[in-house]
Structure formats: C-alpha cells, structure tokens
Amino acid sequence: MDIRPIKTEKDYEWALAEIEKLLDVKPDTPDSDRLDVLVTLVEAYEDEHYSIPLPDPIEMIQYYMESRGLTRRDLEPYIGTRARVSEIMNKKRPLTLNMIRKLHTGLGISGDVLLQPVTIAA
C-alpha cells in the first residue's frame, strides 16, 4: 500500500487523485482500506490548511430565520421576551447557555456555532 503523509500541496493533489480512482471500490477490500486511509489523511491536511471558521452565532440565527421565513417573534420561546430577542439580535447581550440549549434543541442550530463568542456592541 503506497501511502505517505500529506506534507505539501503536491502530496495533497496526489492523494485527491488517488481517492478519485478508488471511489467505486467494493467494501471490505484492500482498495477500500486504502481509500479509508487516504480520506483520513486528506481530512487531516484540510483541517490544518483549509479550515473554515464557524460563523458568527447571531449571523447564523439570522440566516436560519431568513431561510425558514421566521420572524423575531418566532425566537421568543427560545430566547425570551421581545426586548430580550432584540438585545440578542442587535448584539447588546450575549446568548446564555440556556438560550443556546433551547435554540439547538428547538430549531436545530448547531451548538458549536451558537457557543462561539459574540462581540457585544457598546
């Protein structure tokens, strides 16, 4: 099995080409094992060199609202009063752990995103 660490962009491109060749292999074969190892190496390389930062929690909530046709009133069961929703959405107050739990459970917004720090407006 000719597999080596991915240290350079050239190694990365080689691994991607190898993965492409192996996409249709049968499970539980030496080729499928090779595919699994290559995918793991590529994921590690991408995490180190091409990591994508998580979005701002408030921007994620806004996106979620827009994509589902929700209003700020729809956030009240998860955040609190209309005034509290306004404070959160205008970055005047941070999300609490309880709000994060409710938004995650009730709306399915990623907890990883909601836990990101928010810069509070002065």
Image (spheres, rainbow, N blue to C red):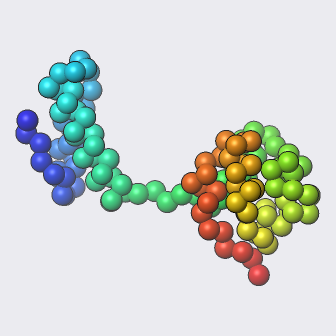
Q: Report if residue 82 is visible in the image.
A: yes
Residue situated furthest bottom in the rendering: 122
Instruction: Classify residue 56 by image quadrant.
Output: bottom right
Q: Could you say which quadrant of the image residue 20 lies in? A: top left
Nearer-the-camera pick, 25 or 21 = 25
- Which residue sits at x=57%, y=54%? 112
| 50 sits to left or right of 72 | left
User: Image point 66% across, 69% down: which residue?
Assistant: 118
Let me know if residue 59 appears in the view: no
Question: Which of these two is toward me, 67 or 28?
Answer: 28
Point out residue 80 in the picture as x, y percentages from the top left corner: 87, 56
- Image location (x, y in percent) of residue 79: 82, 55
Q: Quadrant of residue 92?
A: bottom right
**Residue placed most toward the observer, 69 or 96:** 96
Q: Residue furthest left?
A: 2
Q: Quadrant of the C terminus?
A: bottom right
Q: Residue at x 41, y 57 (%)?
A: 51
Of the 4 image quadrants, the one containing the N terminus is top left
